[in-house]
Image: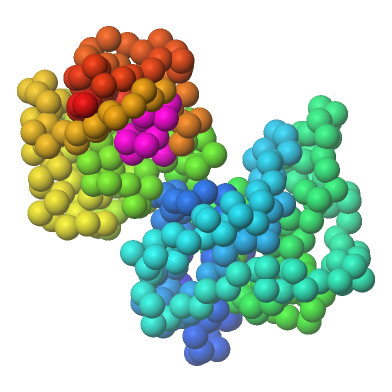
Amino acid sequence: MDTNEILKGVEECISEEELKERLSLNRPLRVKYGIDASGPDIHLGFTVGLRKLRQLQDLGHIAVIIVGDFTAMIGDPTGRSKTRPQLTREDVEQNMKRYERQVFRILRKDRVEIHYNSKWLDALRARDIINLTSMYTVARMLERDDFEKRYKNEIPIHLHEFLYPIFQGYDSVMVKADIEIGGTDQKFNFMVARQLQRNFKQKPQIILLMPLLEGLDGVRKMSKSYGNYIAIEDKPSQMFGKAMSIPDNLILRYFNLTIDSTEDELKNIEKRLKSDENPRDIKLEYATRLVKQYYSQDIALQERDRFISIFSRKELPEDVEVYNINEEINIVDLLVSSGLVKSKSEARRLIMQKAVSFNKERIENSDKYFSKKDRGILKVGKKRFLKLNS
């Protein structure tokens, strides 16, 4: 099998020679992809790896999904300048409910295994953990970029954080992974897995590192923690509106990494971006194709027409949702209960950023209350509307 097809879009492969050798075995390879349970949504950043995984499924290989329900309670320290908050079992279980449904919007069901790593990590005894940790040194751990920076700056590193890459690597041992797919920020963790597999007399997994997709802020990687993401289960209107807010300099990258685009299409997009064409028109095309990919062409075209109507002609949508106020309610609770935002923290952040208004008057703080007498249009950012009624 030609490796060029597999390596298309891959940032780094460790190693191509091993990949060729493993493919020559002429058997379905076990391709691991880990999903943590730190939030309820799979976003476009995740789909960069999931789409590569789907490609390997189509080539006859097995997708081995690891839901990190146990490791989420440690918290992945990757890229963190401080200790990441640990999740409770209840947090993890709540987030996990939506995961399986979401991955099958991209993956095929006939070539997939789904495992929860608590199955084997909960079963480890103290002697097993000691044995695992003996396979890696503190010096090697401190070579990891984020740990090294924190150590030099005298920022605390807790011992449990060292366990995250060890346990993630042990996942590869337990599922006998041939390949692991992930973002470039996961390289250290994946290399730990290779070492552990050697210790357990397994052939080390091949690593396929995918590019990290920048979020809607255009700076940091797309992340649930940063709130700069497009979820694949966002409502069509939310998905379309968020897609239209992509920074102009990332349009080509989003076309390349998140939707099905041919080489000729990408070259054409690049050419158009360098011309005098308004980038908004190219983003309209992207947003339409993105919504079509996760919903349907009819819905995508409806959202396109709706967006043009609202934002090009400065009109309110005809189908603004109505929220009936029965008793006094705080603005933060109103934003969450109406579905305009997903969490209280997001609501407070948007208010602080002066992105929330009522009847075109900006809401300055989160202490504002609404009652039955308040009627009009509540607006969040440029894309979300709610009609208040009593």
- Give coordinates of residue 125: x percent, y percent: 86, 71
Q: Where 116 sits versus 79, above or below? A: below
| Residue at (26% x, 57% y) in the render | 294
| Residue at (19% x, 19% y) in the render | 376
- The quarter of the rendered structure image containing the N terminus is bottom left
Q: Does the magenta stretch include residue 76?
A: no
- Bounds of the magenta segment: 332-342
- Say which quarter of the image contains residue 80: top right
Q: Where 210 sits versus 306, above or below? A: below
Q: Is residue 134 visible?
A: yes
- Give coordinates of residue 313: x percent, y percent: 7, 23
In the image, 376: left or right of 188? left
Observer-nearest residue: 361 or 218? 361
In the image, 82: left or right of 257? right
- Give coordinates of residue 298: x percent, y percent: 10, 54
| Residue at (65% x, 56% y) in the render | 89
Most extreme residue toward the bottom is 26
Observer-nearest residue: 145 or 226? 226
In the image, 318: left or right of 374? left
